[in-house]
Amino acid sequence: MRLSVLQHSPALGETDANLAAVRETLDGATFDLLVLPELFASGYFFHSTAQVEALAEPVPGGPTTAALIEMARAGGGHVCGGLVERAGGRLYNSAVLAGPDGWIGTYRKLHLFYQESRWFTPGDAPPAVYDLGAARVGMLICFDWRYPEVARMLALQGAQLLLHPANLVQPHCQAAMVTRSLENRVFIATANRIGTEAQPGGESLTFTGRSQIIDPQGHLLAQAEPREPALLEVSIDPAQADDKSITGTDHLFENRRPEHYGILTAPVN
Ligand code: ACM
């Protein structure tokens, strides 16, 4: 399958202009699956709940989901990207998966980063796997990478490819995802952003770029530059992720010892 990852620098609060810029970048590109960054049309470093409320939208039914569906139709495949979701009076940092026939699924970020908990409610459900025909995929969002349980839950449900919209500001994720890939024998597509955003108080965040695609053996198939926009494209065989056999006797999943892993789900005192 042809897998694409877009890296760009959206302007904070300029949803319409950011969507138009993504359409222009795609410029007739076709793909089986395209991954866009976290909050790719709204920007990231908000300063008030009112600001986030103004950018929030229902899923499906909001303009960013409509744009994802339109991109899926134009590109002839599926598209995943992040947005501010409004649901039941709450705001979520969500990733949406869409295809030419419409909305397919939403993942609400479980592990919020830094100031995100000022406006977002953490996700309320475990991540799910979607069979797109070309691949079985699951979504995680940015800081979820710090919690290996998220990638593991997806891999245990049969995901071959993890879709990872991100707005990374710390330097470790790109290298750590090689380990997530080796731990789970899955492809991982991280779509990160570039640029800097500042709050009125003066604090700013600079995003680290280096969007990447990793294969189930931990090989880097493609990586963007830290400060340049990019549209990565690779051809992958998702079935490679179905082979969990490390040696003839070491099977990644069959040799797990979940009866001894209870502490992983126990609350921390
Ligand atoms: C992040 O979760 N956006 C770092």
Image (cartoon, helix red, strand yellow):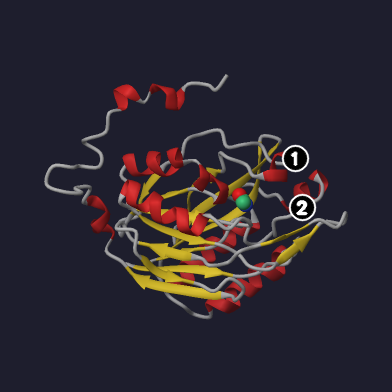
Identified at 49% across, 80% down, the residue is 28
x and y percentages locating residue 246 in the rendered image: 20, 49
Residue farthest along the bottom direction in this orientation: 27
Identified at 57% across, 37% down, the residue is 123
Identified at 37% across, 72% down, the residue is 234
Q: Is residue 91 left or right of residue 31?
A: right
Residue type at mark 2 is Phe
Look at the numbered disc 2 and say if its residue's Cβ is closer than 8 Å to ligand 1: no
Look at the numbered disc 1 and say if its residue's Cβ is closer than 8 Å to ligand 1: no
Disc 2 from disc 1: Cα separation: 10 Å
- 97 w.r.t. 12: above or below: above
Residue 99 appears in which quarter of the rendering?
Answer: bottom left
**Can residue 102 be seen from the camera position used here?**
no
Residue type at mark 1 is Arg
x and y percentages locating residue 114 in the rendered image: 69, 44
Q: Is residue 30 left or right of residue 17?
A: left
Q: Is residue 69 left or right of residue 246?
A: right
x and y percentages locating residue 46 in the rendered image: 76, 52
Labelled disc at residue 97: none
Residue corresponding to mark 2: 46
Disc 1 packing (10 Å; few <14; some 14–19; many ≥20)? few
- Mark 2 and mark 1 in contact? Answer it, CB < 8 Å: no
- In this orientation, which residue lies closer to the viewer: 197 or 88? 197
Identified at 70% across, 63% down, the residue is 15
Residue corresponding to mark 1: 118
The quadrant in which the N terminus is found is bottom left
Disc 2 packing (10 Å; few <14; some 14–19; many ≥20)? many
